[in-house]
Amino acid sequence: KIAEWMRDAGMTTSVDEAGNVHGRVQGSDPRAKVLLIGSHLDTVRDAGKYDGALGVIVGIAAVKALVLEAAASGVPLTRPVAVVAFCDEEGVRFSSTFLGSRAVVGAIPEKVFAARDAEGKTFLDALRDGGFQGTR
């Protein structure tokens, strides 16, 4: 559903090999740095109704507003804007925090892929079960 909402906001979407969902709108200046907005989709027990997910939804809404304003005014966005919905940032399932964001920057230690959840499934097995190869 997140990728669908991103596309509805005018973004192109992709899902990386760790399961993070990316959305992006291009800017008019190809040399401009990307403005990155992001949060995580997972939560922890008793963390609050909108822990993490609100940041993703608000980021998508902000990009949609920027795209609509650019279209209405005829003034394009100068820089690209991206929204990332990070997977497994809280570390609840595999007892290792920031898995999604570490995957984006290529900083997941090899030992994390062997970490097991309460049912004995490794992080790498869980990724592959979801159709992902796993970012190393």
Image: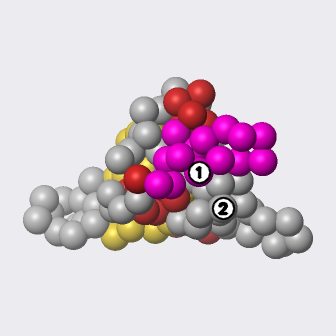
Residue at the extreme left? 31
Specify the segment rendered in magenta. 111-124
Q: Amino acid at mark 1?
A: Ala
Which residue is pictured at 53% across the width and 46% down the height? 114
Label 2, residues with CA under 10 Å away: few <14, some 14-19, many ≥20: some
Q: Is residue 70 left or right of residue 61?
A: left
Q: Nearer the viewer, residue 64 or 24?
A: 24
Q: Amino acid at mark 2?
A: Ser
Q: Is residue 22 left or right of residue 127?
A: left
The location of residue 135, given as percent across then percent down, is 38, 45
Which residue is pictured at 60% across the width and 41% down the height? 122
Which residue is pictured at 47% across the width and 32% down the height? 132
Residue at the extreme right? 46
The residue that label 2 is drawn on is 95
Assign the N terminus to one quadrant of the image. top right
Total numbered circles = 2
Label 1, residues with CA under 10 Å away: few <14, some 14-19, many ≥20: some
Which residue is pictured at 41% across the width and 53% down the height? 110
Q: Earlier in the sequence, mark 1 or mark 2?
A: 2
The location of residue 74, given as percent across then percent down, is 29, 60
Q: Regarding mark 1 in the picture, which secondary structure is present there?
A: loop
Kindly identify which numbered label has been placed on residue 61: none
The location of residue 10, given as percent across then percent down, is 43, 46
Q: Contact, CB < 8 Å: mark 1 with mark 2?
A: yes
Q: Nearer the viewer, residue 55 or 26?
A: 55
The residue that label 1 is drawn on is 115
